[in-house]
Image: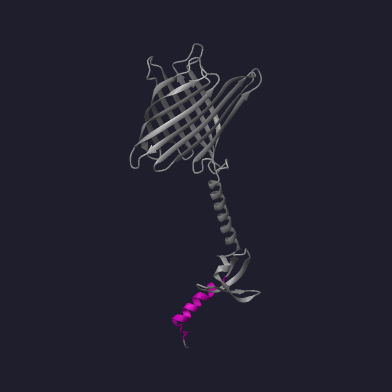
Amino acid sequence: MDRLRLTPAALLAALTLPMAAVAETIKLTNGDVINATILAQDDEGYTIQHPDLGEVTMSKDRVAAVYEDADAMAAAEAASAAQAAAAEREADPGIFWGSGFLAGWNRRVELGLSGAQGNSTNSNIRAAFHGDYEDEQDRWAFDLVYRRTDSEGAKTEDRFTAELTKDWLIPDKDYFYFANGKFESDRFEAWDQRLSGFLGAGYQFYDDGTWDVLGRVGIGGNQTFGSANDEFTTEALLGIEADYKISDDQSVAFANTFLPSLEEGGEFRNITSLDWIISIDQDRGLSLKLGIANEHDSNVPAGVKKNDFTYYASLLWEF
């Protein structure tokens, strides 16, 4: 019995025949979509076999894309549309939620509500926004916080804070320089508004993925408005910030800033915060935040408490 002999050319043709027999989805530049078998392709265009039109030659400039099938085309176009929408949101500064406002930053909205009604009636509101950004040369942090408390129909707390910190990073160095500015409004303090600013240097002690610890030393001061004795107070700044990642779902953040007056009297301010953040839904960016904060001011008028202590539980949304 004679054996069947295959020349190299015949073998190549046999291997390529199954590939040529597979129908593909072709999208034209005018938006039309056709299903046909591509018989040949060169620099000029395609030769296709269409079930109704037969063998057709089509120039390349008429073909927008070729897909394995209709499902592959739908998936590719959905991904392309999502990328285009994301790019449009990043480029449009007029869009606030989820896009243009501080585009490229890590952004987080915080809201906490509590209240009671019965023997006593009270309500508490804490709303905040946090944004941060970092690249090889710059690190930014922007915070807005509003707190309000009503008790028995009377407002007992009404405080707004806006703070911006800029760090100038030095590649391959642990030290950096910073500038900090803060505006506070509180009708229940001895002043109505307070504006403060500082310049200084910092040092990154640890940053190993679990611990992130840095310190700051600076000089500046604060100016009050609406008090009995509005004046500028020169202050130094000594600060420590520490973040500890307990797990993928939990982290703890601690910060303490000591602000001693550089004028006579030995007065000082000290601001402390401790936050525990627990992830609820990572896909949606939802977390629970439990925290305490205290601001001590040694120089207050008679009848005004030196400590402003708060504790809170808030829902966070990161976008």
Query: Could you say where residue 232 lies in the image, as x and y percent from the top left?
Result: 44, 20
Is 269 colored magenta in this rendering?
no
Work out which quarter of the rendered image holds the C terminus and state it: top right
Whether residue 299 is visible, yes or no, is: yes
Q: Hey, which quadrant is residue 47 in on the image?
A: bottom right
Q: Hey, which quadrant is residue 188 in on the image?
A: top right
Q: Which residues are magenta?
A: 3-22
> Which residue is at 49% across, 75% downward?
15
Determine whether, in the image, residue 24 is placed left or right of residue 194. Answer: right
**Is the stretch drawn in magenta largely helix, strand or loop?**
helix
Residue lying farthest top?
302
Determine whether, in the image, residue 174 is placed left or right of residue 91. Answer: left
Query: Could you say where residue 216 lies in the image, as x and y percent from the top left?
Result: 37, 30
The answer to whether residue 47 is above or below residue 188 is below
The residue closer to the viewer here, 29 or 56, is 29
Query: Could you say where residue 54 lies in the image, as x and y percent from the top left?
Result: 63, 76
> Which residue is at 53% across, 76% downward?
17
The residue closer to the viewer here, 315 or 269, is 269
